Image: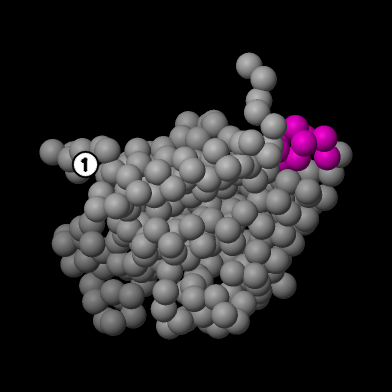
Amino acid sequence: MKLLPLFLRRPIEAVYERRLVAGLVGLPRPQHVGIMVDGNRRWARKAGHTDVREGYRAGGAKVTTFLGWCTAAGIEHVTLFMLSDDNLGRPAEELGPLIEVIEETVRDITAEGRDWEVRAIGSLDMLPAASARVFKEATAATAGRGGLKVDVAVGYGGRREIVDAVKSAFEEHIAAGGDPAELVARFGIDDISRHLYSPVADHTDFIIRTSGEQRLSGFLLWQSAYAEMHWVDCYWPAFRHVDFLRALRSYANRERRFGK
């Protein structure tokens, strides 16, 4: 099927967007959205770029746009999965440019005038020291800023987060003079939830993954116990406002049962 010319597609898409926005009025919407920004390298190759860094740059630019959509939609909390702990094993010539783009993206979303409270989560100490410092400074600079809460998951692994939460719970208990055996006897779900990387992230409503892949890849394993999932076929740099609105419509039309 032949695609419509761009000059025709844009106004038709704009009308469709307005209909989607109007149709969402009064419907349930997620308060915490996790987004797996997948497909940057494949987008670059499909677009004819010989350097996959072009995909990383396009993906980084889309993050700022996406957060604007979330703000307009009244979403309170977003977690961006930008780099897994598994990704840290990539070759240096590939990993280095990716981390640089993530740094640039974090600088952009934490700039003056942005009403976003940004927190870097993950095993930051596994990153190059200079990069870890950039992410930690961004977290400190926006603390208490208010507005949309944005967690940037970098060097992040869901299983590692759970292990670190358990360790943190025991370290806190022991530092306060408690008996480890006593904590073992009463250890429960809340003890892990309180020690996750992001203390407000113990519940996630909705997870979106771009690129057509249909797996969590270790993302928010604890927090996603009752999250709704939405898979999008397009690569992250090509993710449109229409795709986002369709995702919100999909969420609104589901009956959430929380395992009951």
Label 1 sits on a secondary structure element that is: loop
Relative image position of residue 101 (x, y in whole percent): 72, 59
Residue for badge 1: 256
Question: Residue 53 or 68: which is nearer the viewer?
Answer: 68
State left or right for residue 226 relative to residue 213.
left
The answer to which image quadrant residue 64 occupies is bottom right
Membership of 188 in magenta stretch = no
Quarter where residue 47 is shown? top right
Magenta segment's dominant SS is helix
Quadrant housing the C terminus: top left
**Which residue is most to the left?**
260
**Which residue: 65% across, 72% down?**
107
Residue 162 left/right relative to 96 = left
| Residue 217, position as x, y percentages in the image | 50, 40
Residue furthest to the top in view is 1
> At label 1, which amino acid type do we have?
Arg
Residue at 24% x, 76% y is 178
Tell me if 237 is positioned left or right of 222 in this view. Answer: right
Please determine whether, in this image, residue 58 is positioned above or below residue 75: above
Residue 165 seen from this side: no
Boundaries of the magenta span: 41-49
